[in-house]
Image (cartoon, rainbow, N blue to C red):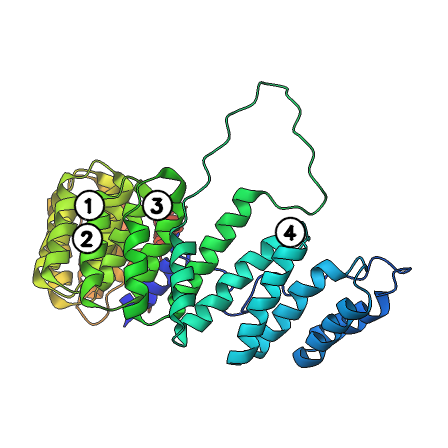
Amino acid sequence: MRSFLILALVAATTAAAPLPGLVQGGPNADPPPAWQQDDPGDALYRAARTALSRNDYRRAAQLFQRLRAEFPRSAYAADSHYWEAFAHYRIGGASDLERAARELENQRRAHPQARTRRDADALATRIRGELARRGDAGAAERVARDAARPARAPRAPTAPGAPTPPRAPGAPTAQGGEEDVRVAALNALLQMDAEQAMPILRKVLARRDAGSASLRRKAVFLVSQKHTAETENLLLSVARNDPDPGVREQAVFWLSQVPTERAVNVLGDILRTSSDAKLRERAIFALSQQRSPRASQLLRSYAEAGSSAELQEKAIFWIGQQASQDNAAFLRGLYPRLQSQRLKERTLFALSQMSGQGNDRWLMEIATNTREPVEMRKKALFWAGQGTRPSASWSTWRSACPTAPCGSS
């Protein structure tokens, strides 16, 4: 259905966009070119790098291990742990995953300053996530800790003009590395079944510190993808109670996929009582995706007498994307009651997007009605002449026909 296509498009442009690394399977999958030609391990590193680039993971793992065994003081030795682990991770067998985890732990102990340490922590979390998905309880517990680990407290600001202490080339900031680990943990949760993932996500969403807001936004998306009896309760709780506006917006948006009257009532309350325009905009969209008479009633009521003209436009737009006789009849009846010329223009556009509802004829009646303003007649004639389109975006509506005959946006 057209509405679900629109849902996919809108979702792709929101903060709930797909989490990084879900398809490619790991952070930093490309070893850097060899940089120490006089190093005794240079030839082995080049061979191992070539094998990895050709997806010959078994040979790559063997070569990285051999490099470290034969030339333990090589400049490449510290990072060879990571690349060997990465190769085993891409092979993907249970024994390979366990070996990869051990190799990353070896690197952590022997080379804590290795250039790949930041990626290594995130990769270790991904590996534990895959092991947890296969039933490893210990790995699942570690993933839970990684997902819920607190954000590092922000540093106190330095005096204006104070120099920044230098750090070693390639060394990541601790806070950035911790965020990578948390994101990797949430990615791992997406791969787990709901029974394993939901208790962990519940703990993440219970946090209230400002440093975890981006983490909670990702958790909201993951909850929406786990279709359980608890999904609705968590999303409703976040929509009402989370202290971060962006997190609440995400929860309201994903309530569009919870087809219950309880969700509809909460969305209606937000629309009536919230002072946050962005939150109300998300509520309008979510209501437009519901398939209940109550949701339609709330959306139509707001289109007719909303507290914001801009949000009334949004309501009219989304009503126009749900082609039905009732919606077409409502918009045709709404048009003469509207006082705003801009809202009338939007109503003409919305009606032009509905097929098979008699709207082309109605638009022509407006175009030929001498009691209508000339500019409105031009717009009705223009949209009637455009024919029915399979779908339209909000940006199309806002930008269409910037000049005569259809008027400004």
Left or right of 190 in this view: 170: right
Tell me whether circle 1 and circle 4 mark residues in contact (CB < 8 Å). Answer: no
Left or right of 95 in this view: 210: left
Q: Residue at x 49, y 60 (%)?
A: 20
Q: Label 2 amino acid?
A: Leu
Distance from disc 1 to disc 2, alpha carbons, whole Å, reads 6 Å
Q: Residue at x 29, y 51 (%)?
A: 205
Tell me whether circle 1 and circle 2 mark residues in contact (CB < 8 Å). Answer: yes
Distance from disc 4 to disc 2, alpha carbons, whole Å, reads 43 Å
Which element is circle 1 on? helix
Between circles 1 and 4, the one closer to the viewer is 4
Between circles 3 and 1, the one closer to the viewer is 1
Q: Quadrant of the C terminus?
A: top left
Tell me whether circle 4 and circle 2 mark residues in contact (CB < 8 Å). Answer: no
Tell me whether circle 4 and circle 3 mark residues in contact (CB < 8 Å). Answer: no
Between circles 4 and 3, the one closer to the viewer is 4
Give the residue at mark 1.
240
* x, y percent for residue 166: 70, 34
Q: Label 1 amino acid?
A: Arg
Q: Label 4 amino acid?
A: Pro
Distance from disc 3 to disc 1, alpha carbons, whole Å, reads 40 Å
Q: Earlier in the sequence, mark 3 or mark 2?
A: 2
Q: Residue at x 85, y 58 (%)?
A: 36
Give the residue at mark 4.
112
Which element is circle 2 on? helix
Give the residue at mark 2.
236
Give the residue at mark 3.
407
